[in-house]
Image (tube, helix red, strand yellow):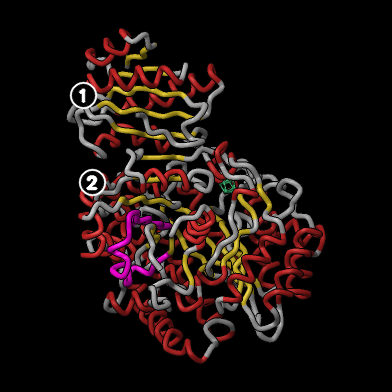
């Protein structure tokens, strides 16, 4: 069962985010994500985004990777949920999401091939950075 | 009464600051010249509570959330931090709000960076989160939700976020979403780690509840949003909402019934209530003040939270509105002044044009120093006492800009006011280098800071002697402040000399 917030996660875009697992924060990840979300907002007309985080970094430490993005965004509603690194679970989850939302996408760090391949196999459009 | 949802915060927020908002600012600095306990008492004395530990007054934003949850049928209440243990057995969700959780906001970050000492508000908040009762609550599975205007600061304290087991950080206007979030917390559903409520999901006027208990020093909101349209500002993206007079009246009555004598009208710019864009309009403002003083009577205080200098000038020059409001509604034997926060930020038209092109509207940014001076004169003539801020050290700033600010300060000298310089400290800098300010300060900055200090000390003595803390029960606070001013005066020359050593000219 997927837990969704009323209002903020209705009429939204769901994005599966594969974070870098590098030691150092990968600065441009946030910048690319910011541009990507602006583009998706323009093309879909949506203003609400749920970011489903896939990362080996524990919560909430992974947010360091997204900090610049979160602080740059003032225009859109952002909900951030964390899923750890269990790709089997993510597969089930994405299938469930797709049943209810035509706007499910992937945004994945280029080295995280396992995830981008998985998402593509589930027919998601994936942006690699 | 059994409360499943407890809202609270640390002592620096859960206080009415002796009924004087301005004293609350002391908590944004480290204790200077006195023990921390005494400093904390000056800035944030304990609040009166009932038998359940519910404070007589509480921060306004938390009152809104409390009201929303009660209206939705939840057993929710704001509890003073010293009385949380009374509710430990029933508590399932702990909600914590703050204006400056970790002292990364202005002016805390400047004090911190200048003195190298953690500000009192940060120490107090950390102590609260580490307190046995909050730890015990977490061990028992209580879900912790934190929010308020400083929610973003958690992004810079990830280790503490993890250590303290905060479940969700929520940022933005929450009225439309908080009931659902809390319901999910109570049902043990997975919660998002971070939520930012975007401008389009801001609540409508109908969705904003009337507070159920008194707010700190009678603060009531009169509008949300801001029409100035500054770049990178989330407030201006939100819809402009003027709170109807009958709702404002209801909230004033809640406060009066609880024994809070006074009102602080809150808005990003009080003079834009019912305005035509950035141009104040007489009718809504006169009606507002007429209603407010009829409600509070002759013997209560009235203050504005914020006003823009451009609106002050425009309102007075076009309509004589400032003197009308002050003479016909505000001033009497009891109310001998009106306090307000204003932003000067810079005395340089060049810098004003870059960092805040809309702030001087309807006047052009080139006229900013005149706008500031005219507004200060108007306020002085009408017994309005501004607490003004300046920002130093912005990345776009040049030494000539700071010189212009120093010149403007000379022109403001005749006008009763408190002027506080704030130093721009980029986030991250504080974490890497606690002496960031000392490493970036210039001779021109020191001159401006010294001028601000001299100006403020001069007028603070005048304000305390003529206007402030007159009530007999505030005698100890008055004495404490006077002693502090004396001490500060003695020390400042030393400190300035000391700082010059760090200048890399
Ligand atoms: S004046 Fe302040 S609140 Fe209004 S738009 Fe500008 S920065 Fe935002």
Kindly tell me whether residue A83 is visible in this rendering: yes
B504 vs B482, left or right, is left
B163 vs B504, nearest the viewer: B163
Span highlighted in magenta in the image? B78-102
Disc 1 and disc 2 on one polypeptide chain: no
Regarding mark 2 in the picture, which secondary structure is present there?
A: helix
Where residue B227 sits: x, y (%)? 66, 45
The residue positioned 37% from the left and 57% from the top of the image is B96
The residue positioned 56% from the left and 62% from the top of the image is B211
B82 vs A74, nearest the viewer: B82
- Residue B214 among those drawn in magenta: no
Question: Is the CB–ligand 1 distance for label 1 below 8 Å?
Answer: no
The residue positioned 54% from the left and 76% from the top of the image is B459
Where residue B262 sits: x, y (%)? 60, 75
B385 vs B67, nearest the viewer: B67
Where residue B318 sits: x, y (%)? 81, 57
Q: Chain of mark 2?
A: B
Q: According to the image, label 2 marks what residue?
A: B162
């Amino acid at each position: 069962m997927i837990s969704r917030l009323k209002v903020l996660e209705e009429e939204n875009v769901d994005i599966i985010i594969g974070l870098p697992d590098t030691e150092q924060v990968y600065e441009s990840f946030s910048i690319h994500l910011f541009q990507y979300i602006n583009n998706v907002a323009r093309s879909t007309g949506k203003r609400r985004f749920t970011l489903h985080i896939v990362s080996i970094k524990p919560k909430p430490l992974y947010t360091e990777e997204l900090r610049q993005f979160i602080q740059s965004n003032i225009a859109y509603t952002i909900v951030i949920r964390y899923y750890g690194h269990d790709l089997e679970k993510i597969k089930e989850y994405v299938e469930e999401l797709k049943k209810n939302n035509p706007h499910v996408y992937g945004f994945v760090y280029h080295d995280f091939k396992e995830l981008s391949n998985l998402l593509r196999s589930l027919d998601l459009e994936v942006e690699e950075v | 009464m059994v409360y499943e949802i407890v809202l609270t915060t640390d002592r620096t927020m859960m206080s009415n600051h002796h009924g004087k908002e301005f004293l609350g600012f002391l908590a944004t600095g480290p204790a200077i010249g006195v023990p921390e306990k005494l400093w904390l008492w000056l800035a944030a004395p304990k609040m009166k509570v009932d038998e359940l530990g519910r404070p007589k007054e509480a921060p306004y934003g938390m009152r809104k959330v409390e009201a929303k949850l009660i209206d939705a049928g939840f057993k929710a209440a704001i509890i003073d931090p010293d009385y949380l243990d009374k509710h430990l057995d029933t508590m399932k969700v702990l909600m914590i709000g703050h204006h400056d959780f970790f002292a990364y906001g202005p002016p805390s970050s400047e004090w911190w960076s200048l003195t190298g000492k953690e500000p009192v508000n940060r120490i107090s908040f950390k102590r609260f989160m580490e307190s046995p009762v909050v730890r015990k609550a977490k061990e028992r599975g209580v879900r912790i939700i934190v929010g308020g205007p400083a929610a973003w600061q958690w992004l810079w304290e990830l280790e503490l976020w993890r250590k303290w087991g905060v479940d969700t950080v929520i940022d933005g206007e929450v009225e439309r979403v908080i009931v659902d979030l809390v319901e999910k917390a109570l049902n043990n559903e997975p919660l998002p780690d971070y939520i930012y409520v975007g401008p389009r999901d801001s609540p409508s006027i109908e969705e904003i509840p009337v507070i159920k208990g008194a707010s700190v020093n009678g603060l009531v909101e009169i509008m949300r949003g801001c029409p100035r349209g500054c770049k990178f500002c989330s407030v201006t993206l939100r819809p402009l909402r003027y709170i109807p007079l009958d709702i404002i009246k209801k909230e004033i009555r809640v406060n009066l019934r609880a024994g809070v004598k006074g009102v602080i009208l809150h808005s990003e710019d009080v003079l834009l209530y019912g305005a035509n864009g950035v141009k104040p309009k007489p009718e809504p403002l006169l009606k507002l003040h007429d209603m407010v003083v009829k409600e509070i009577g002759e013997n209560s205080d009235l203050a504005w939270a914020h006003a823009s200098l451009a609106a002050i000038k425009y309102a007075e020059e076009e309509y004589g509105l400032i003197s009308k409001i002050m003479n016909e509604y505000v001033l009497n034997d009891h109310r001998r002044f009106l306090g307000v926060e204003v932003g000067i930020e810079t005395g340089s038209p060049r810098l004003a044009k870059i960092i805040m092109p809309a702030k001087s509207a309807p006047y052009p940014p080139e006229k900013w120093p005149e706008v500031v001076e005219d507004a200060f004169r108007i306020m002085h003539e009408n017994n309005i006492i501004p607490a003004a801020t300046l920002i130093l050290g912005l990345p776009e700033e040049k030494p000539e800009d700071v010189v212009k600010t120093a010149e403007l300060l000379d022109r403001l000298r005749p006008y009763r006011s408190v002027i506080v310089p704030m130093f721009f400290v980029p986030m991250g800098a504080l974490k890497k280098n606690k002496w960031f300010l000392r490493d970036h300060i210039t001779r021109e900055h020191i001159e401006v800071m010294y001028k601000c200090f001299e100006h403020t000390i001069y007028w603070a003595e005048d304000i305390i002697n003529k206007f402030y803390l007159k009530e007999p029960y505030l005698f100890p606070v008055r004495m404490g402040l006077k002693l502090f001013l004396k001490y500060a005066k003695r020390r400042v020359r030393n400190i300035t000399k000391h700082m010059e050593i760090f200048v890399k000219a």
